[in-house]
Image: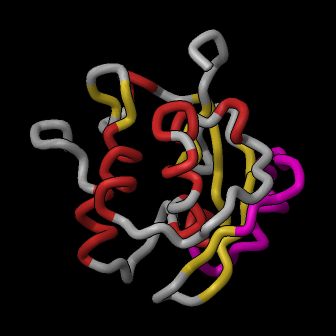
Amino acid sequence: MKDRRLSCPSAQPDSPESVVFGIVEGTVDAPRMTPLAKTQAVSPEILALATPVNPAEVFRFSAPCAECSCKHFQGGECSLVGRIVRNLPMVSDRLRPCPIRPTCRWFGQEGRAACLRCPQIVTESYDSSDEFRDAAMPPEGLQ
C-alpha cells in the first residue's frame, strides 16, 4: 500500500478530489454506514440530498489523505484510526465490500480491525457518545 496514494475514509465533502463512498443509515445512537458499490463524484445534486443537515452527517466521503496537513496525522500514521481501533467496539464480524479499501489509509494501517469498526463512524455527528468524542480528539497540541 505504500506505493499507492492513500485515501482518507473520513474526509469532508469539500476536500479536493472528494468522493462519496457510503451512506449513513441507522439511528443517532447506532449509526451504520453502508458502502456504495462504487464511489460517486461529489456534486451539488448529491450534496443537496442531505438537506437540511450537513452532508457529512448523511454521507461518508473519501479524498486523498492530507497527511501532514491533517491534525490526525502523526509519525507517518493516522492517529484517528489508531484511537478508533483502541477505543471503539467492533460493529461487524465480517469485511463488507468497500469501494475504497484498496487505497484506504485506515485499512492499510490497521487492517481488518479498522474495517470492523468503520460502519459506525459518522464524520460529523452532534450527538456522539463519550467514546466517539474521545476517539475523534486529535493528539494534544494538534487541535
> Image point 66% across, 16% down: which residue?
4
Q: Is residue 61 above or below residue 100?
A: below
For this orientation, the residue located farthest to the front is 93
> Image point 34% across, 44% down: which residue?
82
Q: Quadrant of the N terminus?
A: top right
Q: Quadrant of the C terminus?
A: top left
Is residue 119 rendered magenta in the image? no
Q: Residue 31's spot in the image, x, y percent?
A: 56, 79
Q: Nearer the viewer, residue 52 or 35?
A: 35
Q: Nearer the viewer, residue 72 or 97?
A: 97
Q: Residue 112's spot in the image, x, y percent?
A: 57, 48
Left or right, 97 with reference to 80: right
Q: Residue 66's spot in the image, x, y percent?
A: 48, 27
Snapshot quadrant of residue 60: bottom right
Left or right, 78 with reference to 94: left
Q: Is residue 39 above or below residue 15?
A: below
Colour logic: secondary structure
Q: Is residue 54 visible?
A: no
Q: Is residue 114 visible?
A: yes
Is residue 42 rendered magenta in the image? yes
Query: Where does the magenta region start and end?
Result: 34-53
> Image point 46% across, 88% down: which residue?
29
Q: Is residue 28 above or below residue 130?
A: below
Snapshot quadrant of residue 54: bottom right
